[in-house]
């Protein structure tokens, strides 16, 4: 995982917020992928800031043995509304090529 994923980002929608590490991350080919997670909390005067931690469902998977970009979808439901955010995970070959003469 690259260091740029350590910056918190908040996505506000009405009285609800998703807090996630970042929108994208890169992982080296063949390494183990650990889902960094995502949390959802209430915001605003109606429910109080962070008063309720809400369950978040994660959909999608990452195959670190196949190069490419994968999308993980995080969703939560609160007051009969669905809230969704996504994260892109790039699996890249980080090893430089070897040239033999």
Image: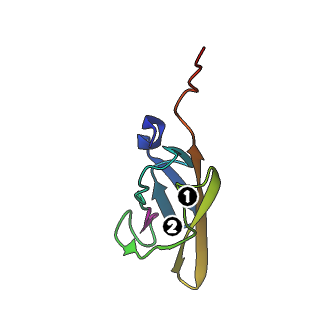
Residue range in magenta is 38-44
Please state if 93 lies on the left or on the right of 35 as rendered: right
Q: Is residue 67 above or below residue 82?
A: above
Residue underneath mark 1: 12
Q: Which residue is depicted at the point 44% across and 46% down? A: 8
Q: Quadrant of residue 6?
A: top left
Residue underneath mark 2: 16
Please state if 68 lies on the left or on the right of 8 as rendered: right
Mark 1–mark 2 distance (CA, rounded to whole Å): 6 Å
Q: Is residue 19 above or below residue 7?
A: below
Determine whether label 1 and label 2 are within 8 Å by CB: yes
Q: Nearer the viewer, residue 45 or 35?
A: 35
Q: Quadrant of residue 96?
A: top right
Few, some or many C-alpha atoms within 10 Å of disc 2 (few <14, some 14-19, many ≥20)?
many
Give the image location of residue 95, x and y in percent: 52, 32
Q: Which residue is depicted at the point 46% across and 73% down? A: 56
Give the image location of residue 45, x and y in percent: 44, 66
Q: Residue furthest right?
A: 68
């Amino acid at each position: 995982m690259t260091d740029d994923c350590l910056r918190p980002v908040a996505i506000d929608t009405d009285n609800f917020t998703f807090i996630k590490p970042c929108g994208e991350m890169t992982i080296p080919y063949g390494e183990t992928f650990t889902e960094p997670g995502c949390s959802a909390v209430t915001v605003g005067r109606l429910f109080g800031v962070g008063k309720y931690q809400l369950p978040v469902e994660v959909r999608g998977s990452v195959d670190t043995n196949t190069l490419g970009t994968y999308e993980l979808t995080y969703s939560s439901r609160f007051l009969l509304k669905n809230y969704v955010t996504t994260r892109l995970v790039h699996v890249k070959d980080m090893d430089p090529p070897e040239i033999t003469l």
